[in-house]
Image (cartoon, rainbow, N blue to C red):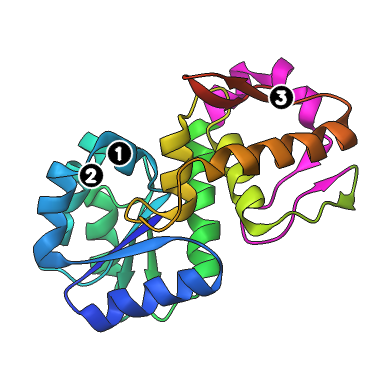
């Protein structure tokens, strides 16, 4: 799930719609509401955030510190015109990346994933032995299906998103609620949370058939983890 913040509802609504067309959940918040939501949001909701997209806001430079206190998700700022001074100020404030509007949501997804990879590189290095078992599996994090041994594996959108989420959080156990919020959005009320169990069951079966082992560990009441 992405969180889009801007002073103008036409901007937030536009990007939420663009993410939706890519099959990715997103929520738009006006600048006046963002800080209040951030301070009161539940932990499972914040854990579901894949990235923060910050548009125009007078207090934008003060937001990264607040976000970092409650979330590990990458923060990308959108600027109207190319400005070296503004870009440097945003990086100094703690923004992870800066893009100029208009920007396609697929580029945003690729940039946030790049930030995730950099932040977790040391963790992955310590888990190299475990990671070696799944070198045959390649996941792209940009809307494309994964492949195993170079062969494309066609996955329904939700299964692909769950696989990406688990790999992004390799070794970390995620609850059913966290997976649901990340894939369907923290504010979705018309889909039952139990749908996650069905998605993961089908995904595990497909991975087992191709890899000859199950890389997803399921612990009742505790959740799911990509462990191999």
Element under disc 2: helix
Residue that numbered label 3 is attached to: 131
Q: Residue 142 falls in which quadrant of the image?
A: bottom right
Q: Earlier in the sequence, mark 1 or mark 3?
A: 1
Q: Residues within 10 Å of mark 2 (few under 14, many from 20)?
A: some
- Identify the residue shown where x is 61% and y is 22%: 218
- For the residues marked 3 and 2, what is the alpha-carbon distance in whole angstroms? 30 Å
Residue 212 is covered by the magenta coloring: no
The crowd level at tag 3 (other Cα within 10 Å; few <14, some 14-19, many 20+) is: some
Q: Which residues are magenta?
A: 121-148
Q: Are marks 1 and 2 in contact (CB under 8 Å)?
A: yes
Q: Quadrant of the C terminus?
A: top right
Q: Is residue 11 in sight in this rendering?
A: yes
Q: Quadrant of residue 80?
A: bottom left
Work out whether 159 lies above or below 17: above
Q: Residue at x 47, y 19 (%)?
A: 221
Do the CB atoms of the residues marked 1 and 3 lie less than 8 Å apart? no
Of residues 217 and 221, which is closer to you in this image? 221
Q: Is residue 128 magenta?
A: yes
Q: Residue at x 90, y 42 (%)?
A: 149
Residue on which disc 2 sits? 67
Q: Position of residue 70 (x, y in %)?
A: 24, 36
Q: Which residue is mark 1?
A: 71
Q: Residue at x 88, y 37 (%)?
A: 210
């Amino acid at each position: 799930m992405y969180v889009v913040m801007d002073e103008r509802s036409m901007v937030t609504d536009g990007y939420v719609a663009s993410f939706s067309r890519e099959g990715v959940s997103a929520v738009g918040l006006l600048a006046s509401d963002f800080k209040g939501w951030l301070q009161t949001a539940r932990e499972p909701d914040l854990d579901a955030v894949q990235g923060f997209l910050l548009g125009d806001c007078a207090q934008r430079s003060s937001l990264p510190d607040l976000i970092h206190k409650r979330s590990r998700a990458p923060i990308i700022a959108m600027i109207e015109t190319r400005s070296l001074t503004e870009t440097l100020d945003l990086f100094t404030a703690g923004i992870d990346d800066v893009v100029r509007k208009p920007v396609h949501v697929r580029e945003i997804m690729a940039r946030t994933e790049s930030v995730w990879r950099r932040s977790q590189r040391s963790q992955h290095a310590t888990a190299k032995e475990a990671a070696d078992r799944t070198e045959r599996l390649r996941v792209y994090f940009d809307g494309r299906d994964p492949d195993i041994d170079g062969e494309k594996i066609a996955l329904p959108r939700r299964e692909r998103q769950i696989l990406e989420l688990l790999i992004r959080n390799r070794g970390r156990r995620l609850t059913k609620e966290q997976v649901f919020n990340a894939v369907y959005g923290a504010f979705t009320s018309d889909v039952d949370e139990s749908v996650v169990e069905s998605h993961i069951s089908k995904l595990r079966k497909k991975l087992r058939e191709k890899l000859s082992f199950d890389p997803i560990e399921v612990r009742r009441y505790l959740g799911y983890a990509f462990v191999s």
